[in-house]
């Protein structure tokens, strides 16, 4: 049987996200609302609220084969965001499991707007 990344398999933990950013220059797209984004986000993340994702992802991330990590506060919205990204042709879309809560728990750097 071939291994396919099903709905849950495209979730990454904070360490895996850092590796993807360092090794493959992954683009981090935060799908939180601007107010949430301003309170804290992953360094270098682009803010694209979930409601605008479908319309604007192609302008934000031009290369559809490059890794994209979708992030939200708890990991719920980013799971839906991965489905949208894959529908748009981003094969390498992942979500941060546990969202910014997991990122902060891992004591990783957070940037405020």
Image: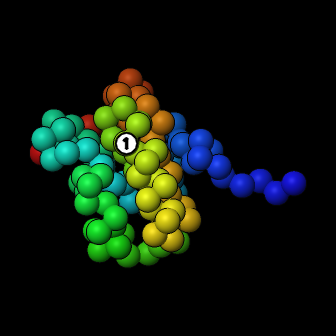
Neighbour tally class for label 1: few under 14, some 14-19, many 20 plus, Cα within 10 Å: some
| Percent position of residue 68, x then y | 44, 59
| Percent position of residue 17, x then y | 48, 45
* Residue beneath the point at 33% across and 54% down: 29
| Percent position of residue 50, x then y | 30, 52
Quarter of the image where one finds residue 105: top left
- Residue tagged by mark 1? 77
In the image, residue 69 above or below residue 111 = below
* Residue beneath the point at 29% across and 68% down: 55
In the image, residue 26 above or below residue 74 = below
- Please name whichever residue, 89 or 51, is drawn nearer the observer in this view of the structure: 51
| Percent position of residue 108, x then y | 36, 33
Q: Is residue 50 left or right of residue 16?
A: left
| Secondary structure of the residue carrying numbered label 1 | helix
| Residue 64 visible in the current orientation | yes
Q: Is residue 19 left or right of residue 61?
A: right
């Amino acid at each position: 049987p071939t291994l396919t990344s099903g709905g849950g398999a495209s979730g990454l933990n904070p360490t895996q996200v850092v590796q993807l950013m360092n090794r493959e220059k992954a683009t981090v797209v935060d799908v939180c609302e601007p107010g949430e984004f301003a309170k804290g986000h992953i360094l270098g993340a682009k803010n694209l609220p979930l409601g605008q994702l479908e319309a604007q992802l192609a302008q934000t991330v031009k290369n559809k084969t490059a890794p994209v990590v979708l992030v939200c506060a708890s990991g719920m919205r980013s799971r839906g965001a991965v489905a949208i990204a894959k529908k748009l042709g981003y094969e390498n879309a992942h979500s941060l499991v546990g969202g910014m809560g997991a990122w902060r728990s891992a004591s990783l750097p957070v940037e405020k707007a």
